[in-house]
């Protein structure tokens, strides 16, 4: 009888253990099966990378990343702009946001009891010291002593300034901005030579650099500032969805495609003389072609500013322009292309602009069969305008041959230079082409188009001559 009782107790204990295990497994499973909230709340600082005012490419680099995450997670997105990173971080701590887009902002999580976690680092940038071109550049860090230095309200930059001050053992004075935004304050300082030096975060400065023609990078300081998301750990499902999403975009090329789309055309070194000439030509030469641009753009469904950027790249708005290869006019058309389009004179501005727009539309239509969409298709079109449609087809085939995505400009940008090498162009139908030139041409048109779009919305004389071309888009 005692053995039977003991056996019964063992059986009872096993049943209890199994029941407890099943219960906790159920709770664990349910915890991770609870779906994300219907709306994901995002806190972000009001900078060009998140809420673009100048970019024509889309809703912004950071915004496209978080839009993609909301779509991936099957949730709506509610994004709110804050004047400083500290305010955005405070919203995350207080439960007013689920995600913080910490663009170069690296808070100390040990200072809060709120359960937070870090997302993966997807970009790094340094603090950059700018100088006004009407004042001497920074020849040695000790020249900062007794100088005033403008610093946006950004804890990473403020820390960099304080560290630099300690290293120099002198007393530069910090003029602290009211917000983390770079664009507005730097536009004012661009016209104010009294402030010689400006400390900025280089990732935020990059997209606005072409519009600050009097400010140049003179040196870099401090440790890298990291771009990542900070997330609430107490939002069920958010961690797993975020991890899965970042694994996807870092392996399928999405992150690199977005970087190319928004920043790939911006040169490492700004040619300030080129920017000065562009602004001058917009004021003095562009107005005489307004009506021709608008008419051709409307007729062929082309963005007027994009058509203008192509024209500037081709001829600098000179109707008599002629290259060493024999192309002529505002749109630098070959004689054969002009005849094909029915032009009687490549030097006539109206005919040249209409012919160039018609040819661009022709190339765009021909690319319909290549499964290329959006801006990628326009960039393929520009490459075809420069090097010929056949060579674009060849580049697409080489992209497939080298296991690259044949429908993105990022891939073709890598492939086009290969067409200068016999190993690759010998396998193509149309043979050798100046592949590096195609890449430079497309990125140059993108750069001018970006600048014209920005100048149209920023205060300045150029806006008066560009707004008529933007209102017709």
Image (cartoon, grey):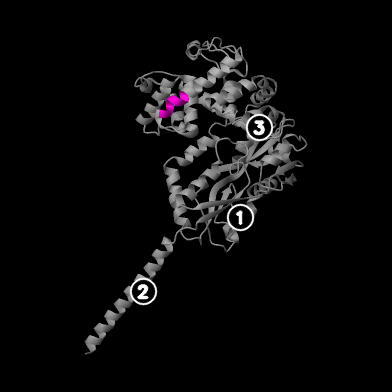
Q: Position of residue 225 (x, y in %)?
A: 58, 46
- In the picture of the structure, the residue carrying the numbered disc 1 is 89
Residue 280 in sight here: yes
The region drawn magenta spans 363-368
Determine the image quadrant of residue 274.
top right
Tag 2 residue: 20
Per the image, label 3 sits on a secondary structure element best described as helix
Q: Which residue is mark 3?
A: 456
Horizontally, residue 130 falls left or right of residue 354, namely: right
Circle 1: is it few (<14), some (14-19), or many (20+) Cα within 10 Å? many
Query: Is 57 on the left or on the right of 418, as rendered?
Result: right
| Residue 240 on the magenta segment | no
Residue 461 appears left or right of 116: right
Residue 251 is situated, as x and y percent measured from the top left of the image, at 42, 43
Number of dots carrying numbers: 3
Disc 2 vs disc 3: which is toward the camera?
A: 3
């Amino acid at each position: 009888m005692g053995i039977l009782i003991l056996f019964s107790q063992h059986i009872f204990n096993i049943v209890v253990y199994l029941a407890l295990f099943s219960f906790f497994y159920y709770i664990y499973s349910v915890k991770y099966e609870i779906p994300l909230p219907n709306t994901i709340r995002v806190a972000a600082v009001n900078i060009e990378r998140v809420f673009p005012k100048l970019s024509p490419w889309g809703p912004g680099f950071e915004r496209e990343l978080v839009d993609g995450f909301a779509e991936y997670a099957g949730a709506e997105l509610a994004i709110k702009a804050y004047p400083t990173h500290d305010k955005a971080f405070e919203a995350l701590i207080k439960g007013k946001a689920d995600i913080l887009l910490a663009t170069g902002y690296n808070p100390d999580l040990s200072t809060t009891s709120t359960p937070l976690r870090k997302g993966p680092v997807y970009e790094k940038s340094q603090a950059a010291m700018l100088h006004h071109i009407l004042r001497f550049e920074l020849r040695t860090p000790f020249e900062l002593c007794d100088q005033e230095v403008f610093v946006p309200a950004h804890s990473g930059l403020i820390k960099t300034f304080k560290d630099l001050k300690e290293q120099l053992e002198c007393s530069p004075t910090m003029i602290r901005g009211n917000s983390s935004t770079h664009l507005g304050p730097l536009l004012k300082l661009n016209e104010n030579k009294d402030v010689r030096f400006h400390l900025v975060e280089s990732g935020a400065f990059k997209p606005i650099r072409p519009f600050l023609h009097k400010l140049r990078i003179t040196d870099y300081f401090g440790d890298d500032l990291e771009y990542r998301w900070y997330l609430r750990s107490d939002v069920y499902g958010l961690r797993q969805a975020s991890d899965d999403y970042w694994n996807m975009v870092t392996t399928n090329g999405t992150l690199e495609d977005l970087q190319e789309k928004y920043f790939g055309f911006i040169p490492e070194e700004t040619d300030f003389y080129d920017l000065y000439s562009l602004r001058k030509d917009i004021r003095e030469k562009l107005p005489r072609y307004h009506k021709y641009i608008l008419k051709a753009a409307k007729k062929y469904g082309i963005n007027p500013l994009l058509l203008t950027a192509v024209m500037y790249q081709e001829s600098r708005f000179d109707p008599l322009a002629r290259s060493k290869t024999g192309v002529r006019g505002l749109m630098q058309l070959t004689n054969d292309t002009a005849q094909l389009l029915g032009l009687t004179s490549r030097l006539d501005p109206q005919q040249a602009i209409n012919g160039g727009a018609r040819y661009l539309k022709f190339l765009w239509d021909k690319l319909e069969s290549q499964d290329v969409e959006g801006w990628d298709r326009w960039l393929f079109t520009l490459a075809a305008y420069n090097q010929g449609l056949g060579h674009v087809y060849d580049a697409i085939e080489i992209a497939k041959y080298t296991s690259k995505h044949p429908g993105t400009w990022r891939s073709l940008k890598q492939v086009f230079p290969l067409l200068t090498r016999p190993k690759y162009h010998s396998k193509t139908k149309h043979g050798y082409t100046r592949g590096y030139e195609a890449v430079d041409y497309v990125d140059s048109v993108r750069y001018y188009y970006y600048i014209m779009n920005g100048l149209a919305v920023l205060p300045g004389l150029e806006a008066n001559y560009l707004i008529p071309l933007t209102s017709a888009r």
